[in-house]
Image: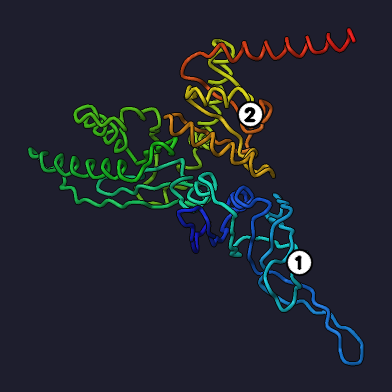
Amino acid sequence: MKLLGRYVDKGMQGNVTLMPEESEDMWHAYNLIAEGDSVRSTTIRKVQNETATGSSTSSRVRTTLTIAVESIDFDTQACVLRLKGRNIEENPYVKMGAYHTLDLELNRKFELRKPEWDTIALERIDMACDPTQSADVAAVVMQEGLAHVCLITASMTLVRSKIEVSIPRKRKGNVQQHEKGLAKFYEQVMQSILRHVNFEVVKCVLIASPGFVRDQFYDYMYQQAVKMDIKVLLDNKSKFMLVHASSGFKHSLKEVLQDPAVLAKMSDTKAAGEVKALEQFYMMLQCEPAKAFYGKKHVLRASEAQSIETLLISDNLFRCQDVNLRKEYVNLVESVRDAGGEVKIFSSMHISGEQLAQLTGIAALLRFPMPELEDSDDEDDEEGAAGGNDSDSD
């Protein structure tokens, strides 16, 4: 997604101009646009013209319309977002208040204005427009003296850094210069990884090379990590994967990504964090049910007690038509983050999101047990049963 303009003031009023560039961007746009928002974009309108003799002719004209959105339809096959609503700005071809359907397509810019922007919507824009936010695989292709540090998103590969160091050849009886050159090269590659790889987002780092270069670099990096106590590398050791490549040039990345072992690892990355969180939730529900709750009522009460460690919430809930309900969910997300909790927003298009939807779309793992939430549920059931008995006795 390309961000062409963003004008949102402190009062969270304003508009953004965006251009979807790939199919995933249309999914982001679908999650951004809500009923009641106004959208401005180019469209084609059939216009009837009446001549002086009374005969009428029709023609199709391209014009720019602004509509107040009343209904949203997302065609995942054609990758088109259809927005139906009334025209709210003067236009030579379309009357004020007349209905029109805008088709948002790839590479067609649109301007979105909301009555009030919230943090979830702004985060969605940042995520859609910043490729590093969605790049959950990093790769280092290297050979002696040359390395490329790349980030791989669902649709493109970004070269973040190219490292070239001239390494002296091994000479008989004098290997020191060669080893010094290698150490300097490895140090630069390690610093580049630390600078460009966001380990909070990246789930897998591929180190690819011909021969034993990758093994030597990996050993050097972890010796340095232990020596200098580089926590980010020590904590993410399991994310590194050593694979073979024919050279240190970017084009050799193609063969690396076709490796079945790499494909298996990468297929797990897209929503690995969400799947793992859901597994933890099910485990907790079995072993310590007082620390795992789902359903809006229980989760809100746990949030009031600031006991939520991880909140699992479906992006489906932010598309609800009720503005106050959406605000309630946004406030919940903000309060969990303010209390130091982690929030995982599940995509309803992914299998983990479908599973969460079966648990009402909202669930929470708690820092400490809250058996009183279970008790309150039993009390509600008892009151309901008592109410039923009273009505029978009448």
Percent coordinates x, y for residue 139 in the rendering: 40, 43
In the image, taking residue 308 as reference, residue 380 lies left or right, namely: right
Q: Secondary structure at mark 1?
A: loop
Percent coordinates x, y for residue 24 in the rendering: 59, 50
User: CB of mark 2 within 8 Å of CB of mark 1?
Assistant: no
Tag nearer the camera, 2 or 1: 1
Q: Name the disc covering residue 274, or none.
A: none
Q: Name the disc covering residue 97, or none.
A: 1
Percent coordinates x, y for residue 370 in the rendering: 53, 14
Indicate whether 65 appears above or below 239. below
Q: Residues within 10 Å of mark 1 (few under 14, many from 20)?
A: some
Q: Nearer the viewer, residue 263 or 60?
A: 60
Q: Amino acid at mark 2?
A: Leu
Between discs 2 and 1, the one toward the N terminus: 1
Percent coordinates x, y for residue 205 in the rendering: 40, 37
Q: Nearer the viewer, residue 27 or 41?
A: 41
Q: Residue at x 26, y 42 (%)?
A: 191
Q: Which residue is mark 2?
A: 356
Q: Residue at x 66, y 32 (%)?
A: 354
Indicate whether 7 appears above or below 250. below
- The quarter of the rendered structure image containing the C terminus is top right
Q: Residues within 10 Å of mark 2 (few under 14, many from 20)?
A: many
In the image, taking residue 334 as reference, residue 234 lies left or right, namely: left
Q: CA distance from mark 2 to mark 1?
A: 40 Å
Indicate whether 317 appears above or below 48. above
Q: Secondary structure at mark 2?
A: helix
